[in-house]
Amino acid sequence: MSLFLSGCPLWLTGILLIILPTAAAAGALILIRGHVGLEQLTTNNEVAGFKFAVVGVIYAVLLAFAVIVVWERFTEAEVAVVQEAGAAATAYRLSSGNEPEAVATRAALGNYLRLAIARDWPQMAVEKDSSDVTRALDVLYASALRLAQNESRQPGVVLELLNQLDTITNARRNRLQLAVGIVPGVLWTALTLGGILTVAFTFFFGTENLKAQVMMTGVLTTIVFLGLFVIVTIDHPFTGPVHVGSEPLQHVLEDFAGR
């Protein structure tokens, strides 16, 4: 469900996660008010108000924790892509030269980046990875190892080139791992159930002005599910309208073409 909502347009996700729950909460409040009556609900105000404060604080802490964790991991995905691009640019410069091994290494590096953009990103959007990109990375390593055997290359340059390839590999592995989603299922259950219970707690209150109470419940529901909306939109960093793009890798390819 999280993957589906992450891939939806923002307006559709907003309808499903904010507007519909808010309308449902307002309708449920009106039904309960008509069924139970104002007098019975009013007797709960004092005790329910104290308990609601505790419930609200507990859920706010849980929601804030989830938002911070998801945002940090989303930022980590951005950093992984930038690191991959930076390592690729450095590896390209370290493999400069007219030797056949150097030319093959640069060609393999460019092919890897093109496949990563064309294949990895669409696959990561559905929590998968591309075997074509993995094979391209294997070819890149093989080309770099043949270049390393060239006696004209300084050992320090060869070592740094292999280090940059390791950085590319680790960065790709990191983004593939983050693509499968950040929030675990048990936390999604706690966030969803906690939001519903927090909103439902307002049904125990009763005020003479029903319209004002419905509006207050609607505002609370909007705020609660707005937090869930934020979490859903960035839970899968490479899926949906709000995602980490491949622009850093594209810029490196453009830099290659200009040389």
Image (cartoon, rainbow, N blue to C red):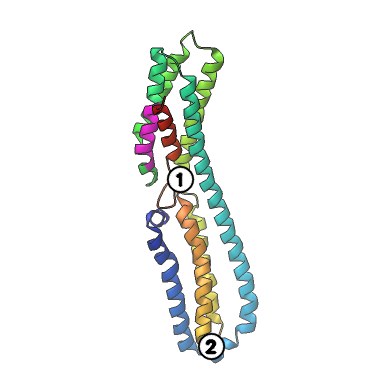
- Which quadrant: the N terminus? bottom left
Query: From the viewer's perspective, is residue 72 above or below residue 55?
Result: above
Q: How dense is the environment of label 1, judged by Cα within 10 Å: few (below 14), some, or many (20 and up)?
A: many
* Residue 225: x %, y % from top left: 49, 66
200 with respect to 52 (left or right): left
* Residue 73: x %, y % from top left: 53, 47
Give the residue drawn at x 39%, y 43%. Answer: 124
Q: How dense is the environment of label 2, judged by Cα within 10 Å: few (below 14), some, or many (20 and up)?
A: few
Three-letter amino acid code at disc 2? Asn
Q: Is residue 145 a member of the stretch shown in magenta?
A: no
Q: Which residues are magenta?
A: 110-121
Residue 218's disc number: none
Give the residue drawn at x 47%, y 52%. Answer: 235
Query: From the viewer's perspective, is residue 226 above or below residue 108?
Result: below
How would you classify the magenta stretch by its main secondary structure? helix
Query: From the viewer's perspective, is residue 31 above or below residue 90?
Result: below
Viewer-side residue, 79 vs 65: 79
Give the residue drawn at x 46%, y 57%. Answer: 232
Check disc 1 and report its element: helix, strand or loop: loop
Residue 244's disc number: 1
Residue 209's disc number: 2
